[in-house]
Image (cartoon, rainbow, N blue to C red):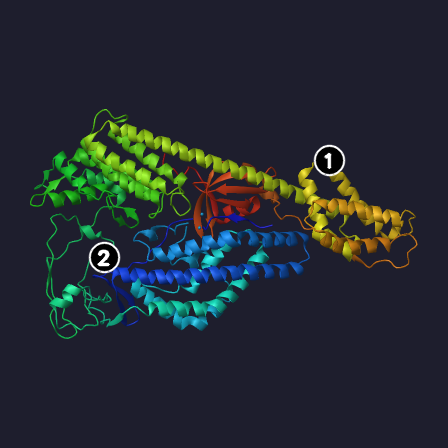
Amino acid sequence: MTDSLEFTPSKIGPPAASSPLALDGSLAQGTTADSLLVAQVSPEQAQTVRRDCERALEQFLRATWSEVIDRGQVSVREVLATTKDFVERSALGDSWEALSAAKAPAGDALVRRMLQRAQDFPAPPGASDGARRGLSLMAEGEENETMPLPNGFSTVETPVAGVLDEVGRLFGALVGAPVTRANNPYGLEIICHGFRESFQQIKLADSARQAMDRVLLQSLMGNGPGYLATLKRTLATIPMTRAVLPPAAPSLVPGTPRPAMARAPAPHIAAATPGLPSGGLSLELIDVPPISTPAATRPIPSTAAAAPSPTGAALPSLDFAPLAFSTGTPPPATSVAATASAPPHSAATDASPAEVLAAIRSLAPAGTSRQRVNGALEPITVVVQRALATRTAGRAAHIPADIAARLATVGDLTATARARHAASAEVDALLARAERPLLKLVTAQRDGLRGGSTGVASRLVSLLGEYASGCDDQGRFIEPKTANAVSGLLDRLDDAVEREPAAVDTILATLERDVDGLRHLRRQRVQRYQEALEGRQRIRDARERVADALRTKLSGRKLPRPVLRALDMALRHALIVTAVRTEPGGTAWQQSLTLLDRLTAWFDPALAASPSRTPAAAETLLADMARTLDGTVLDNEELHSLMAPVRQCLLTSVHGSTTLPELFVVPQFAGDGADIPPGDLAAANALRVGDWWEITVEQRRALVQLIWLSHNRKYCAFANTSASNKLEYMVAKLLKAAQTGGARAVPTSPSPG
């Protein structure tokens, strides 16, 4: 028996983004080794082409998924026919049924997921800070890091490598971002990962998964060329030009070469420079500071020398107005207090609270656009000071020390809370949206607020962090209207801080009621999981009880092949159903054990001369077997084909018969493989339901809560932050993962409060 993962696609974390190149007008770019492919289309035309590509993708996915499931069921049946182990045969039978049940819903989910991936490409900047949307949470272009491609995938990709790369170049030119086989949402590699991600959500035995991988490769090899040809024809309708990339620009620092970049000319530049070639423009860019320095704080030259075009025509010079405020490289996020309390420049003056408020109002309402420096958010005081410098151009004004300290407190609260969430998570967006009203609140120092302005800030940040209990593994709200409702409350708070301070507590009370509702829903989901898991454990216990009985009564014995076939196909399952319904001491269970004893004794060579072996006794035994099989799903024809050979074996073994049936040794019955090594018993007994863990799931770290332990401590289950998905584990494998660093208990819950 193997670990079972039950995820809605998914795997845990937000998407990594490809960085689109800067574009002018409606021009998009796709690069090759020495040239730049430029798509000259309007946004409306580009959208039309993308919709055509999405339709081709949807048709391919639906046809291929249906084919893979149908052929996969055939392949699973073939594996089942050659498997002798009873436990594995049962698992394969369950796999066949799971494939049948998942054909329609899993196919629809796959199509939605892959279309969403294509529509989102390229992902927005900042998505690379976490995993892709999806306890499915994976980055664009990082699918090859979650699970390896199946063996033999190169045989699928190699024959169509040329058209696959051409589709990538054309699509890259259309969207204005680098496209490779590893991140192309229309490529066979991403599609293969998408199919395998869907397989992960279906309860399959290991041998069934291997069979599905083989079938998947066969279907991709058969359907892929036609699909790629359709894509190429669709993308080939886009008008393209190609610009030659120039040689690398000379570095301004000796010994450190900097590659040159090329851009297609914007329409207004092309019109102003008639000497430029119509196919594109090659430029050498001026040297810039290292990327680790935030763009808003870099010194910018007041002028830039014009670079000659390939034809010798001079470009117009580009003038930049010098920034009124420049801090150079900002301090790290860990030194916020020091930054806030730094003494002002001797020539500077403190800004008034009204000026600081005006600077805060100028920040974007959806967030302060705090930049990340080495993965950490820059100090909030730097953001506000930058806005203040813009508004007070002409004089050096600094944030007063007392206000700067309060702003730094808000910045620390939100930065700590946002560090708990992926950059593309909706909770992170809410926390960023809350920064502006909180900055206004601590600057204005409104009276009458419960806990004061700093206390209100702490309460609000804590409440917003707990909204993670309403999000799925991709960081998106399970109920989409939740984001709109909370954003509306934050907008109202932004207005109430200055106009209606008394409404602040009312807004917080509304958020608290909303969070209480989310907690209640999560508790309900966890309780349903626990009830279902207890039911599954009861089935496991029944299977183990039947396996013990078969090991005790049949292992090493000899029985005719028709009896072994009946035991494998129906009688064993009937015994399991009886064990689920009755306790070990129940009448029905004891009758089932007696039936096994009578069956083995009938074919015992030592009792061949027993006078009790009469034709009437054989018919009675046969009737008792048929009565036991009443609960199995066998129609009259199937039951007759199963029992007729058994009846023949019983009748040929009666007293005085000279033609005995051929007997075969009954194979050993394997256990569930979930036993805990003696050395791990103490660790297993120390597990506590309710604790939070960090577990590696398909090479990604997932924060989950232990929600269930079986009565024998052999199995456990975890739920993600919102309890929208669960993960089942054998305790023995969990403890082994903990020893190798794949799992660890964490001391606190994921919510900042």
Q: Earlier in the sequence, mark 2 or mark 1?
A: 2
What kind of residue is marked 2? Pro
In the rendered image, is residue 666 in sight?
no
Quarter of the view holding residue 410: top left
Q: Residue at x 47, y 68 (%)?
A: 156
Q: Are marks 2 and 1 in contact (CB under 8 Å)?
A: no
Q: Residue furthest front?
A: 636
Tell me if residue 74 comes above or below residue 604 in the rendering: below
Answer with left or right where residue 651 lies relative to residue 706.
right
Q: Which mark is residue 416?
A: none
- Image coordinates of residue 320 in percent, x first then y, are 11, 57
Task: Judge by depth and name the residue closer to the eye, 641 or 572.
Answer: 641
Residue at the outermost bottom position = 311
Q: Is residue 141 above or below residue 6?
A: below
Horizontal side of 706 relative to 664 (left or right) equals: left
Name the side, left or right, on which 220 lies relative to 272.
right
Say which residue label 2 marks: 290
Q: Nearer the viewer, mark 2 or mark 1?
A: 1
Name the residue nearer the viewer: 570 or 41: 41
How many other residues sit within 10 Å of disc 1, few (<14), some (14-19) or many (≥20)? few
Place of residue 517 in the rendered image (x, y in percent of width and height, measured from the top left): 40, 33
Determine which residue is flagged by label 1.
586
